[in-house]
Amino acid sequence: PVVHPPVATSKPIDYSNKDVLLIRLDNIGAIEYGFGKGTDQRLTRLTNSDTARFGTIIKELITGKSGYEIIVKGNNDAKYENFKRVIDALKANNLFKFQMITEKD
């Protein structure tokens, strides 16, 4: 059978007044993360020494919080291994629903 992916929307969603766990993947291999209002928040760069404990970092960010959105933001040049790191960290915290936002570069 042929499987058709969901249709992507180009209409932006307004997250400015929503609590957001934001994870950003850039095209040079960096992962940045933060928790706050909207998608224009200050992010912390994941260091090489923190890579192994990224799941714990996510847990610390979300502990005691509810009703937040999870957004993974990146561009077409983001490295697959970093995307996998993000997915693994989310899975480690039983977080399976998130929004993907692409950046124009």
Image (tube, rainbow, N blue to C red):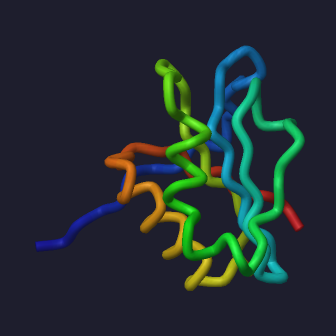
- Residue 36, position as x, y percentages in the image: 74, 29
Q: Residue at x 56, y 75 (%)?
A: 52
> Which residue is nearer to you in this view: 62 or 42?
62
Q: Residue 19: x and y, percent?
A: 65, 23
**24 left or right of 64?**
right
* Residue in the image at 63% along x and 74% along y: 51
Return the residue nearer the eye: 82 or 104: 82
Give the quarter of the figure containing the N terminus: bottom left
The percent position of residue 14, horizontal first and vertical second, equals 71, 24
Q: Residue furthest left?
A: 1
Q: Nearer the viewer, residue 35 or 102?
A: 35
Note whether 90 is above or below 64 in the view shown: below
Q: Is residue 55 above or below residue 69?
A: below
Query: Where on the picture, by quarter, is residue 10?
Result: top right
Residue 91 x %, y %: 36, 58
Q: Is residue 103 left or right of residue 85?
A: right
Name the quadrant of the C terminus: bottom right
Q: How many marks?
A: 0
In this orientation, which residue lies closer to the viewer: 4 or 35? 35
Determine which quarter of the picture holds residue 60. top right
User: Is 29 on the left or on the right of 54, as rendered?
Assistant: right
Instruction: Give the left or right position of residue 45, taking residue 75 as reference.
Output: right
Q: Residue placed at 55% from the left, 31% from the top? A: 69
Q: Quadrant of residue 27?
A: bottom right
